[in-house]
Image (cartoon, grey):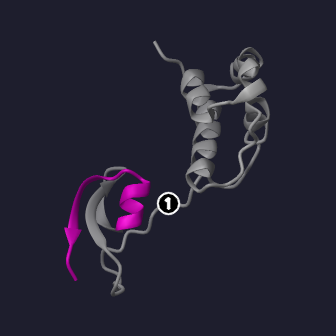
Amino acid sequence: MNTSFDYLWALLKPQGEFIYRERACRRLWDTFSPAKQQEIFLRIQAKLQRAEFVNPNPYFAIVNNVGETTPVYDPPTNYFGKQLRHGVNYYRATYNGINGLWTEQDVKRFNMSNPQKFEI
């Protein structure tokens, strides 16, 4: 059975000498509540998706992402009922249970369900 730490470790993919930090990282990880673990995981995941810096030392990758108060990500914009721009691909899709009209980029970024291309 995979634990949340196993998913974090796979996400971080430590290299070189840092692969030997697993035990210390697991002990650190276990000090956080499940909600805090999820917050840290999502923050690191979002940074990696945006190609932002995440410390290659997994211990410090965790520590550096504990106390940030910025949101993990900006939620996508639902363009239903808004003026649409030409040259942008829009899709009807579902995000967090909300049916709406989203950009192609957001549909992919947030892995939305039931995407259907919308023609202007």
State the count of labels: 1
Q: Based on the displayed image, in which of its 4 quarters is residue 89 positioned?
A: bottom left
Residue numbers of the magenta segment: 104-120
When asked about the image quadrant of residue 7, the answer is top right
Q: Is residue 70 above or below residue 89?
A: above
Q: Give the amino acid at mark 1.
A: Pro
Q: Quadrant of residue 102?
A: bottom left
**Residue at point 71% right, 45% down?**
54
Image quarter (top left, top right, bottom left or bottom right) of the C terminus: bottom left
Report the front residue among 18 and 42.
18
Badge 1 element:
loop
Camera-nearest residue between 73 and 86? 86
Q: Is residue 12 left or right of residue 59?
A: left
Judge whether 120 appears above or below 6 on screen. Answer: below
Q: Position of residue 28 (x, y in %)?
A: 75, 22
Q: Residue 7 lies in magenta, yes or no?
A: no
Where's the N terminus, which quadrant?
top left
Circle 1 packing at 10 Å, graded few (<14), some (14-19), many (20+), is: few
Instruction: Identify residue for label 1.
Output: 75
Q: Position of residue 71 (x, y in %)?
A: 63, 54
Q: Identify whether 93 is placed above or below 32.
A: below
Q: Is residue 75 left or right of residue 58?
A: left
Q: Position of residue 49 (x, y in %)?
A: 55, 51
Q: Is residue 94 left or right of residue 38?
A: left
Residue pictured at 44% horizontal, 56% vertical? 109
Residue most extreme to the front: 16
At 77% from the left edge and 33% from the top edge, which residue is drawn?
A: 57
In reply to whether residue 106 is colored magenta, the answer given is: yes
